Amino acid sequence: MPTNFTPLLPSLSTYRSNSLRAPAFGHNFLRGNFTITTWLLLGALFQILLFLLPLRLTYTAAPVLVLLSWQILDHLLMIIGLKPDIYQKRALKAKYTALFPDENGEFTKGDKKGIAPGAGNICVFILGFSVNHVLGPLAPGSAKLSEYAQAMFKELETQASEYGLLSFNYYTNSGAHTTGCEIMTIYYFKDMDYVHKFANSSVHRKGWDWFNRHTKEYPHLGIMHELYQVPKNKWENVYINYEPTLFGTAQHHITNKDGTEKWISGIVDAKGRLKASHVRLGLDSLYSLEEDITTGDDNIEE
């Protein structure tokens, strides 16, 4: 009798947004577009302006002292345990892996008819955007291109099942430059055909046609992409005490027998059999009823 892998996150009735409209992205993008030196100079300028006002020294120094004291106190309360640690709260405290559910949104195991880890193809699409200009995001043409990008993200999210979108995550480049005016978005699709379908959609064609018309006018705007089709049993993943990211944020569209819809997270507990990399790959020669990988420390890879 097949049993189930243990899902760690509840299902949702709609696709969970993870777009550039999120406040955290705007905050981090703005902060990353200026060097530490620039932020310190801006803070110093603000303090100078306060000193120029006809105010007592107490009032001009108060904003800095109050904000800094609050930050120190807030973190001390988290360190000694009198306040929940917001940094730990965002992580999923478990060893887990992300799989594909079956057509019913379940994760069965135990016989050849069940869902084996590593089942299903994955299409990975990496999209990059950079502004190679002294004004960064304020450079000519940047706002217009961002407007088209926002429309594309909205279309993908609202029509995620139509375009086979599983998830996408975005990052800024902090390894090559001191400022982060380069955005990298990593998408996961069910298949490469869905990527081509979106590429030929009207919302994508509008943005792409605009960019092609203005490449000479705005040579500082850069776009790149990489596309990979990963066959089944050629991929696996594991996360330990980690905030869900990349394929771990994938959402799978399921239509119930009564016609209602739901979105299933692929995150399941990676203890027992799933602690081994070759099992998560779903290799048929190693994944069988007779094999039992349940001993030892579940946090140690085998």
Image (tube, helix red, strand yellow):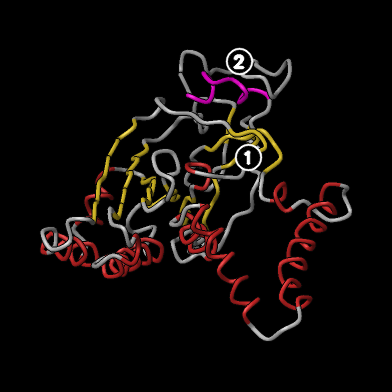
Q: Is residue 160 magenta?
A: no
| Discs 1/2, front | 1
Vertical arrangement, residue 32 with respect to residue 116, above or below: below
Q: How many marks?
A: 2
Numbered range of the magenta stretch: 272-281
At x 73%, y 71%, the residue is 61
Residue 180 shows in this picture? yes
Q: What residue is disc 1 on?
A: 242
Residue 257 shows in this picture? no
At x 39%, y 59%, the residue is 160
For residue 199, what is the image quadrant?
bottom left
Q: Residues within 10 Å of mark 2 (few under 14, many from 20)?
A: some
Is residue 153 shown left or right of residue 253?
left
Which quarter of the rendering shows the N terminus?
A: top right
Which quarter of the rendering shows the C terminus?
A: top right
Q: Amino acid at mark 1?
A: Tyr
Q: What residue is disc 2 on?
A: 302
Is residue 251 shown left or right of residue 11?
left
